Every structure is written in C-alpha cells, then in structure tokens.
Image: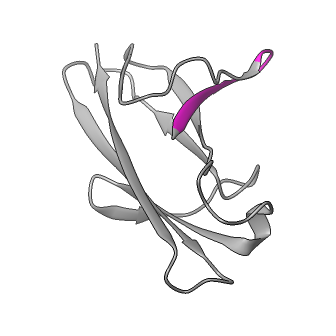
Amino acid sequence: LFYERLLLEGTITSAAISLKTIPSGSEFKVEAVPFFMNSSLLSELSFFWNFNGAFSDPQPEGPNIFLIQASPGSKGQSASIQLVIRNLKSVLEEARASFNVQVQ
C-alpha cells in the first residue's frame, strides 16, 4: 500500500493512495508499506520503482520512499508509478502495486 509522507506529520496511514492530484510546481513523498510481506525488515526486501515505464533509483531516505516532483508548467499531465517488492529470503514472494498522479 502507498501512503503520503509529510515532513512534520510523518506517514499518513489513514488513507492509502490510488490516485493523487498535486499542483504544478509541487512535490510529495510516498511511502510503500508492505504489510502482507513475510518479512519484518526492509533490508530483506528489494524495491523496484517505476515512473511512467522507466526504472527509478531509490531515495536516500530508504528503498520504500519515492519522491514525486511536478515541474512548474506541468499542469494537465499525469504519471503512473509502479512498484515491485521482492522478498530476498523467499524467492517466490513478490508484491506489485501502482498508483497514478495528476497535476493541476
């Protein structure tokens, strides 16, 4: 599941993200929380983020964090973010999820 991560409040787990609308020129962070994976440590999981079909490097904050930035003048655009999580200790365990972002 995906949740918005705010600077002062932390991760907002009361509302999972499936579609997020943001203003042009803004940014937001998403945290992936793998509730149903058979692992209690993030280090036992591999996170593969994909932004509009292109692989994206992990954020310095952690592999389960993704930063989305809407450039000024990008009003009307949209993006698709996909994530694949693999359990390094259990080869057959994998989770996939995605959400969309629209810029207003």
Check the image and report above or below for 44 versus 58.
below
Percent of width and height locating residue 62? 73, 54
Quadrant including the C terminus: top left
Magenta stretch: dominant SS?
Answer: strand
- The region drawn magenta spans 2-9
Q: Does the magenta stretch include residue 47?
A: no
- Viewer-side residue, 23 vs 9: 9
Q: Position of residue 4 (x, y in %)?
A: 58, 26
Look at 69% across and 84% down and name the residue there.
Answer: 89
Front-most of residues 60 and 97: 97
Colour scheme in use: one colour
State the image coordinates of residue 98 (x, y, percent, origin top left): 35, 46
- Looking at the image, the residue that sits furthest to the left is 76
Q: In this view, does 87 lie above or below 90?
A: above
* Residue at image coords 60%, 17%: 14
Residue found 48% across the figure and 37% down from its top: 68
Task: Compare residues 37 and 81 and report the one nearer the observer.
Answer: 37
Circle count: 0
Is the residue 103 above or below the residue 54 in the image?
above
**Residue 42 at x, y = what percent?**
75, 62
Horizontal side, residue 65 vs residue 27: left or right: right
* Picture quadrant where residue 38 is located: bottom right
